[in-house]
Amino acid sequence: MEKVNVGFIGLGCRGGGLMGTIIDFYDVNITAVCDKYEDRVEEKSEFVKEKKGVLPFGTTDYREVLAREDVDAVIIATDWELHIPIAVDAMRAGKAVALEVGGAYSTEDCFDLVKTWEDTKVPFMFLENCCYNREELLATAMVRRGMLGKIVHCHGAYAHDLRGEVTHGKENRHYRLRNYLGRNCENYPTHELGPIAKVLDINRGNRMVSLVSVASGSFGLERYVNDNKDTINPELIGAKFMQGDIVNTIITCAGGETITLRLDTTLPRFYNREFTVHGTKGLYEQSANTVFFDGDPEKYWISADYIKENINNADKYAYLLPPAWQNITKEMLDSGHGGMDYLELRDFIDRLKNGDDMPIDVYDAASWMCISCLSEQSIREGGAPVGIPDFTNGEWKNRHSLDVYDLL
């Protein structure tokens, strides 16, 4: 396969961003575009024509994209509710799938996704771009070399002030609004969990066993609406949001490790994923851009100079990064989310052309996405423990490690 014919299903903010990244790939043709809103279809069709010189097929019915012979693969970036159903239909139609991230609404959907892939073996990749990010890959390199020792605990967060996006969901036709009105869960777990799962070899020698989730009350959006009545849709004034302002989730793993996740999107704050890897020999903290190795414990808390010398030091270990990051260009860095969108999509296309296994596969997608619906159950039951299904049916013990770090 010299060139890959790609169809886009979902042309909102994320779909449009991915299109802007992949459209300059020399070996990709965008042959079809789809969204339920006709104006988006028209806009992105013209964008493709302007960049590539060919007007793609446009439709508001994704099934028409799946029926086309000039579509080899689809990139799915619709609202969260449709991610799995469309991915299932695409695999059944023989179209390779690149599925944008989001949480699942039921474990049954996740099992359906896995079974469909097992029945069809159509190439499938979950587009968790944070697995390709510089800092996450640097920590992974240290873990793979044993520099941090036995990993005991990892932490991550989706800490992102989304109050404007959520409350203007009707005007922007964004699906987050209805989710925040009607659900209470860890609704967007994979940015933080994906890189952690790779560090801990989840589904490849290790697995997540159970979780507990608790949620604070929902106060942030109500206050935001009341303070911005002049610009907020009047329908939201007085509305009650179900989504807790802070959701904390604790996950236990078969290897004895623990994971903590925090959803924090409806209170004032700066963006942070808080990616942290804590081992017996050292600690990596993304927020402080710091690697901390074992030494004299007495110095850790009494010496201000010691702290100054060892804070913000991670960049000196950049030589451990994979070649793709060593050789990254300004154009790649500017192509979406600081380079990780480019590396992610480039990896998908290359592996699709070569017939290689995908590094973030259907088992990863199912086990990461199911955290949303399982956290919803745990919160509803007062923080009760909930088991996490083994989507590999026991094969996690035997599956070889396939790491993004090793592939770049």
Image (spheres, rainbow, N blue to C red):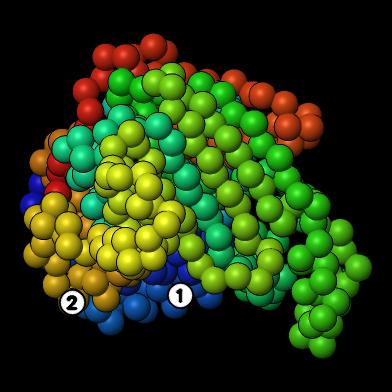
Q: Which of the labelled discs sits on residue 330, or is there none?
A: 2
Q: Which of the labelled discs sits on residue 9, or is there none?
A: none
Q: Amino acid at mark 1?
A: Glu
Query: N-terminal of the two: label 1 or label 2?
Result: 1
The secondary structure type at the circle numbered 2 is: helix
**221 lies left or right of 388:** right
Q: Is residue 30 visible?
A: no
Q: Nearer the viewer, mark 1 or mark 2?
A: 2
Q: Residue at x 80, y 52 (%)?
A: 217
Residue 328 position, x and y percent, is 14, 67
**184 lies left or right of 238:** left
Q: How many marks?
A: 2
The residue lying furthest to the bottom in this view is 230
**85 lies left or right of 244:** left
Q: Is residue 179 visible?
A: yes
* Spatial CA span between label 1 and label 2: 30 Å
Residue 57 position, x and y percent, is 36, 63
| Other-residue count near label 1 (Cα within 10 Å), few / some / many at <14 / 14–19 / ≥20 | some
Q: Which residue is mark 1?
A: 42
* Vertical placement of residue 93 versus 22, above or below: above
Q: Are marks 1 and 2 in contact (CB under 8 Å)?
A: no
Q: Nearer the viewer, residue 172 or 338?
A: 338
